[in-house]
Amino acid sequence: MENNQTLITEFILLGFPIGPEMQLFLCVIFSLLYILTLLGNAVILGLICLDSRLHTPMYFFLSHLAIVDISYASNNVPKMLANFLSQTSTISFVPCITQTFLYMAFAHTECLILVVMSYDRYVAICHPLRYTVIMSWRLCTTLTIISWIFGSHLALVHVLLLLRLPFCGPQEVNHFFCELLSVLKLACADTRLNQLVIFVASVFILVGPLLLVLVSYMYILRAILRIQSGEGRKKAFSTCSSHLCVVGLFFGSAIVMYMTPNTSHPEEQQKILSLFYSLFNPTLNPLIYSLRNSEVKGALRRALGKDRPR
């Protein structure tokens, strides 16, 4: 047994059980979505950097969300596309563990960034006169740094607990990337501690933040309903609805993935859920914020030269 453990230096990513023609079709579709992810989030980043009207805490957090989405997709999608075109879908042990770490780190960071964004909207709508005092650049920077550091450290805990386990076969990861739960199934040792830590971490990083977001929006909704101006209510709903759409997409798929029993969603369903927050969500996020946010659309028109004064 000891010798077998030392011989395992790579895993095989099974991906999707489909024929060559369907693999080529999905490769084209996912390539287009990946390009849209990169372009959409890059446009959001560019507009925030170039347009001084977007130099506010809300768009500062949105820029970090765009960075997370680009990193998120780039960690998983290129390898998946390469496997579609390759006869052998292998990945070495170290790159596999690195992919697992980065995937978890970006996921945790996005959770926390979304919570920070909801707090920003709460202060902006419920305490507008004190907004600039409360949401100082020092606080914004501190909250963002904490999100990145905490997200990375929590991912490191998962990886360190994973590395203590022996992997003596089989080598087949039933996923399109080295997702934590799928790799954990290959360990030939007791994984109950890992599963317990994953569940507890999910409560703190998913359920806890989601409850904070919902509480924030309860106060936000009450404040919006008190606004006398119809235009004011419309503007408030516009900025908040974009964030709520992103929160629903991300937290919904993540909670179903990590907080429900494994028997309730088979492995093929897990892969589809992973696609949501690995590819579909990063693609949709910039579209949601650009289509439902008048300030972003205005910045885009100015950047294209279509909003110049006559």
Image (tube, rainbow, N blue to C red):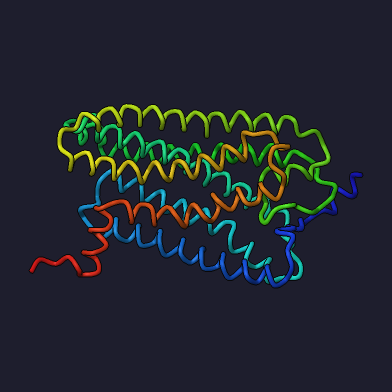
Residue 135 coordinates in the image, percent (x, y): 26, 35
- Residue placed at 79% from the left, 42% from the top? 187
* Left or right relative to 192: residue 236: left
Q: Looking at the image, which is closer to me, 51 or 92?
A: 51
- Residue placed at 32% from the left, 41% from the top? 240
Q: Is residue 23 above or below residue 132?
A: below
Res 262 → quadrant: top right
- Residue placed at 65% from the left, 71% from the top? 24
Q: Is residue 33 above or below residue 242?
A: below
* Left or right relative to 294: residue 288: right
* Left or right relative to 275: residue 163: right
How many numbered dots are placed on residues in this image?
0
Res 196 → quadrant: top right
Where is the C terminus found, in terms of image quarters? bottom left
Q: Looking at the image, which is closer to me, 28 or 120?
A: 28
Residue 271 coordinates in the image, percent (x, y): 65, 51
Res 263 → quadrant: top right
Residue 153 coordinates in the image, percent (x, y): 55, 38
